[in-house]
Image: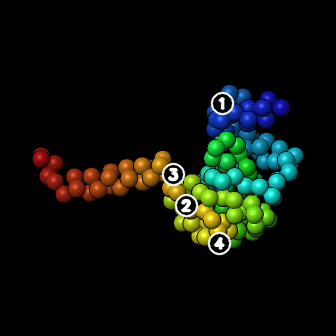
Amino acid sequence: KQCLEKLTEPVSLKHIANELSTSDSFVGRQLLRAERDFQTNWHYLPKVLLMDEVKSTKSATDAMSFEFMDAETHELIDLLPFRTIYQLQKYFQHYDQAARENVKIIVTDMNYTYPKLVGRIFPNAIVVIDPFHLVNALNRAFNKTRVRLMKTLATSS
């Protein structure tokens, strides 16, 4: 019960696990078990969705799972144990056409799957890259270039 109460807070599974002196995979399992108690509203989706991958628990079909949230309230809408485009399309087609047409913006990382998904499932939505992921990619590119250039210089330089 304490674990489920903590899951309502906007913190990571790892943070909750540390507070409860347990593992983050245990917290993830509790979240997936609790999921059965919640019914999905297939008639509504918010105007702005946040989409991302999260590290999966052993019960998932892949190393990464898929989560999506309401961008305004930061409420988790669903956590799925898969993230392939085929499975995501199949899942989102359960939502009414009107619910899918209500989505205007999808904020995500640079995963190539999501723009394909948006084009097929959310006819009125555009994809916006999350600034965190964009800055991360730029930082990695600058560091890679810096290291490559430094290797061309003499060590005494």
Residue matched to label 4 = 120
The colour scheme applied to this rendered structure is rainbow
Q: CA distance from mark 3 to mark 1?
A: 28 Å
Instruction: Verify CB contact (< 8 Å) between mark 4 and mark 1.
Output: no
User: Which residue shows up at 73% across the image and 39% down it?
Assistant: 27
* Amino acid on which the number 4 mark rests in the picture: Arg
Bin the neighbour count of mark 4 within 10 Å (Cα to Cα): few under 14, some 14-19, many 20 and up.
few
* Amino acid on which the number 3 mark rests in the picture: Asp
Residue 75: % across, % down: 70, 43
Q: Which of pointers 2 and 1 lies earlier in the amino acid sequence?
A: 1
Frontmost of labels 2 and 1 is 2
Bin the neighbour count of mark 1 within 10 Å (Cα to Cα): few under 14, some 14-19, many 20 and up.
few
Q: Please, what secondary structure does the residue beneath circle 2 have?
A: strand
Asked if residue 113 can be seen in this view, the reply is no
Q: CA distance from mark 4 to mark 1?
A: 40 Å
Frontmost of labels 3 and 1 is 3
Instruction: Verify CB contact (< 8 Å) between mark 3 and mark 2.
Output: no
Residue matched to label 1 = 18
User: Which residue shows up at 12% across the image and 46% down it?
Assistant: 156
* Amino acid on which the number 2 mark rests in the picture: Val
**Left or right side of 135 for 130:** right
Q: Which of pointers 4 and 1 lies earlier in the amino acid sequence?
A: 1
Residue matched to label 3 = 130
Residue 19: % across, % down: 68, 27
What is the number of the mark on residue 127? 2
Q: Please, what secondary structure does the residue beneath circle 1 have?
A: helix
Indicate the quadrant where residue 4 lies. Answer: top right
Asked if residue 157 can be seen in this view, the reply is yes
